[in-house]
Image (tube, rainbow, N blue to C red):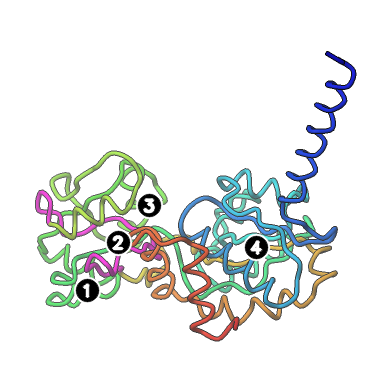
Amino acid sequence: MNFLFDRRRFASTLLGAALAFACALPAYAADSVKVGSKLDAEASVLGSIILQVLSANGVATENKLQLGPTKIVRTALLSGEIDIYPEYTGNAAFFHNADSDPAWKSLDAGYRKAKELDAKNKVVWLAAAPANNTWAVAVRQDVAGPNKLVTVADFAKWVNGGGKVKLAGSAEFVESPAALPAFQSTYGFKLAADQIVVLAGGDTSVFEKAAAEGTSGVNAAVAYGTDGAISALGLVALDDNKGAQIVYAPAPVVRADVLAKHPEIEKALAPVFASLDAATLRKLNAEISLDGKDAKAVAAAYLKAKGFVK
């Protein structure tokens, strides 16, 4: 056997395979805008929306969606590993150790504060969606309707008047000063121990399902404001009309140097995010988390239906 010949042939085969693999990989332009996102359903659909809108507007993109949790994605943005991703205004309070500032309790003021603080990092917050993905109290529709429960203030009045409530939530929601205790102190009510059912974990859909099904007499649950299960399960998210919670409005955050190269990004994304109110996000989230649809497909269908892409 000619060993040298075989070795060369093997090397040639490896080289051919490597070239074939390289050709199969997506080709990205040197100045492609790297679009990232976190792992949850809402982050995935918002990231897909950003990716598809930029592509539809002639911006070369690189898909880095579902990159990791907040810390990883935020670090990737600051280091230049990604260029843009959807973030929440309320998280900026913790990025900058400024969570005691009352500005975070307002969508507009919180957005302006986030924009101001992140300017030093050469990060730009583009226009936020008119939605709030923060802690919320959700009640069954057959409870909310007859008792005229629209806001947490209505809920507090009902509880103080002897309303029969049993709320399901996580230990974090019940115990964290920023969660249920903040609602109670802001609105002046107090749930007794037998009015609270603490369930393991932090998956709000579990609490919402317990309320919807009346498990152990539960008729209210902790939720996040844009949870897909809220409407799908026949619940009503009460309006935090006195601002007990920090507002978490979703917005695209982009590296300033990238925006300078592609100023069209801001114009393209502004009307899209303006259309994403709480009801819309709940619907999109439900399609993913409850119906099992792919986030990319959900984003594409929404953008096409609204005329944002052809």
> Does 310 sit above or below residue 197?
below
User: What's the amino acid at mark 2?
Assistant: Val
Q: Secondary structure at mark 1?
A: loop
In this orientation, does residue 152 appear? no
- Which of the two discs, 2 and 1, labels the residue nearer the N terminus? 2
Q: Residue at x 61, y 44 (%)?
A: 71
- Which is nearer the N-term, disc 1 or disc 3? 1
Q: Which residues are magenta?
A: 214-237
Mark 1 and mark 4: span between their CA atoms? 32 Å
Q: Mark 3 and mark 1 in contact (Cβ < 8 Å)?
A: no
Residue 232 included in the magenta stretch of the image: yes
Amino acid found under the numbered disc labelled 1? Leu
Q: Position of residue 86 (x, y in %)?
A: 60, 61
Residue 285 in picture, x, y percent from top left? 41, 64
Q: Circles 2 and 1: CB distance less than 8 Å? A: no
Q: What is the C-alpha distance between the residues marked 1 and 3?
A: 20 Å
Residue drawn 69% across and 72% down? 54
Between the C-alphas of marks 3 and 2, the distance is: 10 Å
